[in-house]
Image: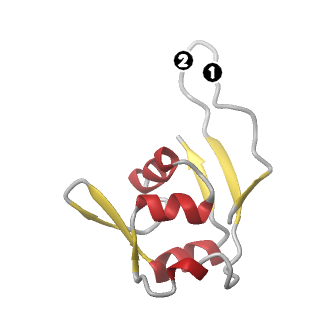
Amino acid sequence: MCRQIDAPAATKLTGATNQPVEESLQLNCSTDSTLLANYHDVDVLDTNDLSKILGIKVVTVRQMLRLNQIRHIKIGAQYRVPKAWLIEWMEEGGSYVRQ
């Protein structure tokens, strides 16, 4: 499971402009065999699968996908992530930037 590391303070509004400050959340993701052990026969993951694997809420997963932080395929209103793309993202550091 991915774990949060070095999570900064919550997003705040800046002075007079009331513009949100970008918040970065680094996820500590390893691609060891235990992380995807329950998904050895699955090639494409949905948001529920990603939530369980990464250890974060489904809402956060959807936001990450909307912001194109994880490479994905959108079919109608549903997101799908090939397992190979998730592994690639995790090997690159697996970060999440809330905007």
User: Which class describes the residues within 10 Å of circle 1: few (<14), some (14-19), or many (20+)?
Assistant: few
Horizontal placement of 73 versus 35: left or right?
A: left
Q: Whole-percent x and y of residue 4?
A: 73, 53
Total count of labels? 2
Query: What's the image's color scheme?
Result: secondary structure
Disc 1 marks which residue? 14
Q: Whole-percent x and y of residue 18?
A: 54, 18
**Circles 1 and 2: CB distance less than 8 Å?**
yes
- Callout 1: helix, strand or loop? loop
Please tell me in which quadrant of the rendered image residue 89 appears: bottom right
Q: Whole-percent x and y of residue 92?
A: 63, 74
Disc 2 marks which residue? 17
- Callout 2: helix, strand or loop? loop
Give the residue type at disc 1.
Thr
Please tell me in which quadrant of the rendered image residue 41 appears: bottom left
Residue at horizontal 65 percent and vertical 75 percent from the top = 35
Q: Is residue 67 above or below residue 83?
A: above
Please tell me in which quadrant of the rendered image residue 78 appears: bottom left
Which one is nearer the viewer's eye here, 4 or 10?
Answer: 4
Horizontal placement of 19 versus 34: left or right?
A: left
